[in-house]
Amino acid sequence: MDITRLWGDAFDKQPAQETIEFMAGRDVTGLAPADENLIEVDLLGNKAHCLMLQQQGIISSDEARLILEALAEIENLYRAGEFKLDPAKEDVHSNIEAFLVKRCGMEAGGKIHTGRSRNDQVALDMRLYLRSEVIKLSASLTGLIKGLLTRAGEHLNTIMPGYTHHQHAMLTTFGHLLLSFAEGMQRDLERLRDWYNLFNKNPLGSAAAYSTTFQLDRELTSRLLGFDSPHLTSLDPITNRWEPEASLAAAISLMMNHFSAIAQSFILFSTSEFNFIKLSDAYCSGSSIMPQKKNPCSLEVIKARAAIAQGILISLLSIGQSNLFGYNRDSQWTKYLVMDLIRETGACPVILKGVIDSLEVNKKRMLEESGRGFITATALAEALVRHHGLSFRQAKSLISKAVKYSKGEDKVSFSALKQAISEENLSLSATGDQVEDYQDPERIISRKRCSGGPAPAIVQRGIEEIEAGLISNQNWWDEKLKQIEAGQKEMARLEAALSKNK
Amino acid sequence: MDITRLWGDAFDKQPAQETIEFMAGRDVTGLAPADENLIEVDLLGNKAHCLMLQQQGIISSDEARLILEALAEIENLYRAGEFKLDPAKEDVHSNIEAFLVKRCGMEAGGKIHTGRSRNDQVALDMRLYLRSEVIKLSASLTGLIKGLLTRAGEHLNTIMPGYTHHQHAMLTTFGHLLLSFAEGMQRDLERLRDWYNLFNKNPLGSAAAYSTTFQLDRELTSRLLGFDSPHLTSLDPITNRWEPEASLAAAISLMMNHFSAIAQSFILFSTSEFNFIKLSDAYCSGSSIMPQKKNPCSLEVIKARAAIAQGILISLLSIGQSNLFGYNRDSQWTKYLVMDLIRETGACPVILKGVIDSLEVNKKRMLEESGRGFITATALAEALVRHHGLSFRQAKSLISKAVKYSKGEDKVSFSALKQAISEENLSLSATGDQVEDYQDPERIISRKRCSGGPAPAIVQRGIEEIEAGLISNQNWWDEKLKQIEAGQKEMARLEAALSKNK
Amino acid sequence: MDITRLWGDAFDKQPAQETIEFMAGRDVTGLAPADENLIEVDLLGNKAHCLMLQQQGIISSDEARLILEALAEIENLYRAGEFKLDPAKEDVHSNIEAFLVKRCGMEAGGKIHTGRSRNDQVALDMRLYLRSEVIKLSASLTGLIKGLLTRAGEHLNTIMPGYTHHQHAMLTTFGHLLLSFAEGMQRDLERLRDWYNLFNKNPLGSAAAYSTTFQLDRELTSRLLGFDSPHLTSLDPITNRWEPEASLAAAISLMMNHFSAIAQSFILFSTSEFNFIKLSDAYCSGSSIMPQKKNPCSLEVIKARAAIAQGILISLLSIGQSNLFGYNRDSQWTKYLVMDLIRETGACPVILKGVIDSLEVNKKRMLEESGRGFITATALAEALVRHHGLSFRQAKSLISKAVKYSKGEDKVSFSALKQAISEENLSLSATGDQVEDYQDPERIISRKRCSGGPAPAIVQRGIEEIEAGLISNQNWWDEKLKQIEAGQKEMARLEAALSKNK
Amino acid sequence: MDITRLWGDAFDKQPAQETIEFMAGRDVTGLAPADENLIEVDLLGNKAHCLMLQQQGIISSDEARLILEALAEIENLYRAGEFKLDPAKEDVHSNIEAFLVKRCGMEAGGKIHTGRSRNDQVALDMRLYLRSEVIKLSASLTGLIKGLLTRAGEHLNTIMPGYTHHQHAMLTTFGHLLLSFAEGMQRDLERLRDWYNLFNKNPLGSAAAYSTTFQLDRELTSRLLGFDSPHLTSLDPITNRWEPEASLAAAISLMMNHFSAIAQSFILFSTSEFNFIKLSDAYCSGSSIMPQKKNPCSLEVIKARAAIAQGILISLLSIGQSNLFGYNRDSQWTKYLVMDLIRETGACPVILKGVIDSLEVNKKRMLEESGRGFITATALAEALVRHHGLSFRQAKSLISKAVKYSKGEDKVSFSALKQAISEENLSLSATGDQVEDYQDPERIISRKRCSGGPAPAIVQRGIEEIEAGLISNQNWWDEKLKQIEAGQKEMARLEAALSKNK
């Protein structure tokens, strides 16, 4: 009995494997040791440190060559899935150092730790790891925004109720709604850039937080590793080892809140009662007992993960809250926290994009509800101001009464309006046709054409503005990627020079 | 190069494996899938459900026998390490059901899910799992309290500074301090009992939250599983599936705060500057770079884990915050959260007990600081009230001045006191010897013999009171364990009766 | 232009003043100084301390009389609104002590602070204050539960959809739903009792945390103030001054989560799309711009306040997290936090009760949706098991297909079922009438009569069980109130004896 | 009896009023209604809206003039302390609108609300309010950083222990420590700029979230109010009304964590046991019972306020977590939360600056501890590498043993080193004088001259770099202030033109 047997019988389409995994969480999937995430970046840091030690004459060219060869060997083993972390060797740093000492001898291998400590090593590894995850997240978030814009463009004229307090407020369009989601996510993108600007700094060379008597060239390692500069002091990145993690968790929590509110909106839209959208089976799952169920699980899981992000943020802030300066072991736990955060939230933009790409819109139901609950009353009041000389306060008060007198209906009736007018001792020229016109959904939407509004042309212009923003954002990141590549090329040059001089 | 080579060279004693694992966290250790924690309890729930279905005539005795045999087979496989969860089967519930269907055929195996859903199954599993963890935690916490009491008894006369605002306040003893820690932990124990009372209720038979048309006997399954009763409604335990988890997280967070403050106090006590205690090497680790380091890592890790607990609590509350009633997928994540909580905090009482059992007290340093910073000034002021007729406000004001005039000293000098007396135009009969006596540390402690104070006899009485409390607490838990055993015996009887009637 | 003009024109009924205040929050209402909340309890503590000092011979009867008279004077001033806290005197404790010194002279008034500190004074005040708030909260929560039960009793037969994942799951009744809310709140009540048991202990006599050389009678002050006993150590209640606050915040957060989920459910129910209930205008407010709006503001505000509670809980845990033992000034902020908590959440049970008492149920809409989305499919599958010999897995799979073949309909059609049956090569005796019957809402509800289910008789029994629980809960609290009164009587006797002996 | 009487007798200097208030919190100080904070900005928003309506021909010049005169009248009343919010009028927006209607008549006054809602009004007010608070915070934070740099410059040569795990790690200087604090705070400054860039956008004209049929000129109001642009959609700023608040709370929480860790470090430094620094009496308070106490209350209060910030952040995220799009009343509570945040944290940079400016450094004690606990062992190991040909791993292992053999001493002795050397079968040329030299504190510091280290010249260079950064930061803000002023000037011009054309 596989999942299909358990609940998929009524489905037209089965969820993709990645969606199943997203929804299944950790039920049947374990987690790898945290330091497995750091093997590659630790090797990179070792390489840069080794080259710098050689350039500074702290180790000899021969020693450097030996170490670099051994590092390359680990990298090959790792890529082949054959470099395993030995728990007896405590962490990734000592596993790699132990390998180097074994391969190169204590004489050469014993020198790799010159002028550094595990404190700056792990701080470095986390920067490189987080930097790379931020780059990935920025890309998938960009994809999601593009997805929103595409669908917004398809629904410029799809009229639907706008809500405040979960109650019918005024009309809008589905395109306007999707565009507003995209606007919020632009800030999420921006926050990732802000993070990068704050933390693309090199902690290597801090040693245990108080520097070293070796004359390290920290400008060189910064360049090799694509950092903007070394940290100004050796102490700050160690005392505040929780901060890049907490700062990223804040940015991600804010982003997840956006996702979570979208998820909640779509969950409501796909209830029997709203029936505004239909999610693709590919993002749903069923029940072990109820034959008819197609549950919006992917969206619920996004909400859960937003809650996870908040807790992780608090734990990170709590760890960094009031310790004596310098390294404290408490901060080791920030590593697991931020890795959990990334694991829990990293796939969300992709899944959410999938949901949005594939959802079916029930325009008929949306339009039906767009005629309910006096949702056009404000537009009517505004029209009385625009065309019939009332002040807004008068018009609003008048229409409030007219709403009251239209009980049982969904729009303000002409007779109710007249009753209200006469009660207020006003003389108003509006005709029945006009009152009808002022409450016509399509016309209302077309009249909401001031900046930010739902009129199709305005939404279309908004789509284009965000698209332009995405391009300039992409250019920014491309520069950053070039900077990283430049470091790698310089590293390759130095390594080649070493080999040549053998 | 193993850990010893990396940092253990200056250690007299190496940390035990469990301490190393406690300190190493998830660096080199992965996590098993969450549902592995539920295999045993899921089997138990299946067994109770199957027996009940048979007793109610919903399935036949033959069908029940087949199912029970297959469940026993899984249990044997599991104990032999050969029952693995297949990710393709989504979770522990469908893995086990799939096995039953395969073993007993759709005819019989397909009946195990009669009148239940995964919603009540997982709610049941979590109750059984959490209940068992709470029982374990209560036991290890009791052990820690006993450890505190033992050491408190050894240090009835170990005088030390009491602090407020981190400043020398008044004298106390190390025994008094440890007893106060034990007093707080009694509340932690109590909260575990409160949790048990609230949540030792049976959710099985709720089906998907809205009950079933099968006539289940929920009193029977409650008895078999050692619960106090079924839940009153089928809906409450499903809507509030986050609540036993969040409620436990609150209890554990409060407990961890106690541990964290103790950890912080001991970390300060073991600084070079305080030098009040020396932690056993067995609970420390060293540095990759600094030869002299012995770091109080086990205590720092306890602090980190307290921070983790707070974040988990917030995530749990956040998940349970404002959903529509009934099951929502978000709550699946509460499973991982509470398992993480238990993994992170479960060992803390044991480790903290080890630290306390093995720490060395530097009585000399404690006494030395007990003579500093006018820490006996309040006792002197009180003596002037008790023996020389001043009101407390007068005495306090007088001694404040005397402190000012004793600048550069650590106790109030007789001459400074006389100067203050004369300034205030008081005539006071105190002699130099008396002033000395009133500020004598040992005598002060012996005079602090009102209820709750540090006088040795009072602390001794407190130790005995807590010991008595621990016994009555133990009796309470013993009753609960008997209730669980009674259920298991009844289950065995029903199963035996079934076999006999074959 | 008052509120009515701004938005009330379309309302039948205006919100009550207390509801307006509940919704308006702090927009136009300031907060009084925190210590104003403590004047009464501080006077009480002073009185008990004074009587005890006299009984122990630490102060004379004349001095005690003077002090008690001055305390009575303050109390009279306070009741007349004429005792104002002078900011120059720092806090309530020093304001009152200053008054005593001024009134009774330094000779007598200067003795009230004998053997105590502000540390134990504020700890005492907070216990007394929180105790009294917990008593009030328990009463209003009881009122809310009673309200739920009353309305549950009215809706035993009001059929509605039960949801999981926000999707139609199975049928239930509105009475069953309300009863499930009440079941959860019973635990909230229980947690208030647990809190009381843990913290109804006397911190007075701890002095600055390290006791005193005066021979205080802490059993006496405990009795006078209605406490179960003094704390075992002078240090624990000072070190853990954050704990009664945090522990209460945890209990209240859990309760608020219950309220918040109910609020969310009712907000959805009152949307245009659900249209299941209509909130009374008395718990709504309108819009400054939209004439038609009646917003469920009271429910939204409950959700906001649940969010506030979580933040306060975290701040309290954070303050108590890892300080050195003894008093630390950080904990002063716990006072504001818990007072904010009480102010924000205290009225919630009353408001929520009002909302529930007054909401109108749209049975027709509920029944209409009860026929949608194959919500009766599980009942049909169960019937095939009960009457037609299928295993549940077979039945569920069969009905899943039948659902698929009934696309466009809301119930499984007989022809779709037959198609599924023939595909599965089953021979099944069910007739069209039976298939109709098995999916009949009323009959399904009446068949869900196992423990915890929605059958009217079962829900009625549940109502009675909770009512019985409320009575026994009330008895428990009555005992506690008697204990407090007994203390006050003993205080009055001691005071009278003093006056007589003048 | 004033505060001085209660505890100040032993003080040389009394705390300033603002420090007393900072420490006294809300004990004897109430809070004003939240909307009092918004009167000025609401008037500003009204003015801009009114001028725009007139420019667009939506209201007449005469109407605009009337309204502007009434607004000016309110402003004058407000400045004179005579404009009070009437609770019957619900909030600041309706209070002001009611005044306008009363003053200008329904005809003109009733038009101010044309094309807007309270939803966009409050969103606007909060932007203007928060923007102004961020500007102030940035200024006071800059002041604090400057204070740190000044004192860092004074202590380039003040040698002290550097800690990891609260244990002596390696030597550093007090100047290096202070510079590292300043480095962290630069990121806090940066985050305030990032916030400003994200949120200096105009929500006015969103109306109730779905725009309006009036042809508003949102570019104009944006310019008048100093915003970079209007929001792209009318919906985003309303749905995400919690976001500027939460985003700022994240930035402030991170900043407060920096402050809190500094506070904790200084609290430890001022214990009797460390005795590294002496806080000025002006930032301390005393005890009601203990004559000798001078407590570092201002620092403890900073820690408390950091805990408050975290809770507020969580409440804000919780409110914004998973609501349906559009306005929900829950978000009204974000107003109180962020105002509480600002009230609690706003003064912290100023107070912390005061503490740092005025603290006395005990260089003698710092130097004394700089010779304890083998704090120079790493430098010795490094010297063996630099001058005697060992690999670092060998040297570290060797010195670890030498530390072990030097038990009871504070530095590695020559004899212990020789013993270790001989055991390891090494031949090492180091002399006793060299071993002494390698462990000499001053020389070690002077050798730590690689980038980021504590050598005086390096720290001096760091000071200069941060100073340069502060200047460029100031320039950035100056531009922003000019932008705001430009808007105000344009507003004045438009107003003047209106008056002229009367």
Image (cartoon, coloured by chain):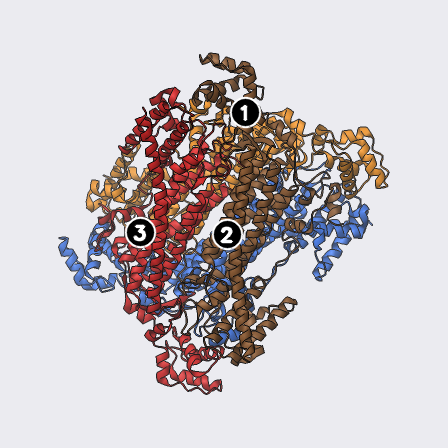
Chain colours: A orange, B red, C brown, D blue
Whether the residues at callouts 3 and 1 have beta carbons within 8 Å, the answer is: no
Q: Chain of mark 1?
A: C
Residue ID for mark 3: B351
Lower sequence index among marks 2 and 1: 2
Residue placed under numbered mark 2 in the picture: C192
Task: Give the CA separation, mark 2 to mark 1.
Answer: 40 Å
Quadrant of the rendered image containing residue C426: top left
The percent position of residue B135, horizontal first and vertical second, equals: 36, 46
Against A2, residue A97 (above or below) is: below
Tell me if residue B432 can be seen: yes
- Pointers 2 and 1 within a single chain: yes
Distance from disc 2 to disc 3, alpha carbons, whole Å, reads 32 Å
Given this view, does label 3 or label 1 mark the residue nearer the observer? 1
The disc numbered 3 marks a residue on which chain? B
Three-letter amino acid code of the residue under disc 1: Thr
> Number of callouts in the render?
3
Q: Please state which of the two labelled residues, at mark 2 or mark 3, is closer to the viewer.
A: 2
Residue identifier under label 1? C376
Vertical order, A264 against B387 (above or below): above
Horizontal side of A119 relative to D328 (left or right) equals left
